[in-house]
Image (cartoon, rainbow, N blue to C red):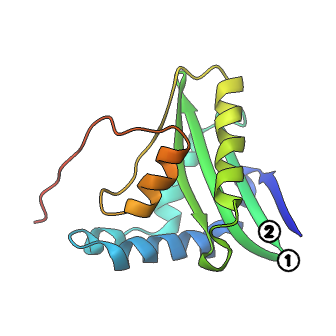
């Protein structure tokens, strides 16, 4: 049975292995920015979340048979919700876990009266772009970057 539940920021290290898989996925699949993904470390990435209070940070994990298989981190700043990071283990994709977690976060942001909800997705990650389109997200801007 798959369990989906929230955890406090103090327990965020639970998702470290999944976060690393997510980072590795982006590193491996990026044509132009693999070096940038390679240089990101979990501890540095989560430092910024420490500033958020319980009402503006949500961390949800999915667990199957004592194994963590997915997570989502979302934040709220001045009535703007942001899906910060999400990952579902490859072995459990396509059965609705990601959708269930994201919908839970979208409902939370709407309950907190967010006026907009956003997510940043790598332009190269077409499957994830399609995932978010099915949930009602549309491209707004395209930020382009030069590799130096």
Q: Which residue is mark 1?
A: 66
In the displayed structure, 29 sits above or below 117; it is: below
Q: CA distance from mark 2 to mark 1?
A: 6 Å
Decide: is 91 above or below 116.
below
Horizontal relation, residue 70 to residue 23: left or right = right
Residue 63's tag is: 2
Q: Foreground: 134 or 85?
A: 134
**Is residue 59 shown above or below 61?**
above
Residue 121, percent from left and from top: 39, 53
Q: Mark 2 packing: few (<14 Cα in 10 Å), some, or many (20+)?
A: some
Q: Nearer the viewer, residue 99 or 82?
A: 99
Residue 110 in view of the camera: yes
Image quarter where the N terminus lies is bottom right
Please give the name of the residue rendered at 71% of the width and 33% of the height, measured from the top-left corner: 108
Relative height, residue 83 to residue 45 (above, below): above
Q: Position of residue 57 (x, y in %)?
A: 65, 40
Residue 130: quarter of image: bottom left
Q: Residue at 85% x, 77% y: name it.
A: 66
| Residue 85 disc label | none
Name the residue at 30% across, 56% down: 123
> Is the residue under label 1 in contact with that under label 2 (CB below 8 Å)?
yes
Q: Secondary structure at mark 2?
A: strand
**The C terminus: image quadrant:** bottom left
Residue 133 picture location, percent across and down: 47, 45
Is the residue marked by circle 1 packed among few (<14), some (14-19), or many (20+) residues within 10 Å?
Answer: few
Q: Nearer the viewer, residue 30 or 147?
A: 30
Q: Would residue 86 be found to the left or right of residue 70 on screen? A: left
């Amino acid at each position: 049975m798959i369990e989906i539940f929230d955890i406090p920021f103090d327990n965020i290290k639970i998702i470290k292995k999944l976060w690393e898989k997510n980072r590795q996925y982006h590193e491996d699949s990026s044509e132009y920015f693999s070096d940038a993904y390679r240089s990101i470390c979990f501890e540095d990435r989560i430092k910024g979340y420490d500033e958020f209070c319980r009402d503006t940070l949500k961390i949800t994990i999915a667990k199957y048979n004592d194994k963590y298989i997915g997570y989502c981190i979302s934040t709220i700043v001045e009535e703007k919700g942001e899906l910060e990071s999400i990952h579902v283990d490859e072995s459990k994709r396509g059965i609705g876990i990601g959708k269930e977690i994201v919908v839970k976060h979208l409902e939370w942001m709407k309950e907190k009266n967010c006026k907009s909800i956003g997510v940043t997705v790598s332009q190269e990650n077409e499957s994830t772009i399609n995932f978010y389109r099915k949930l009602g997200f549309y491209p707004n801007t395209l930020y382009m970057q030069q590799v130096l």
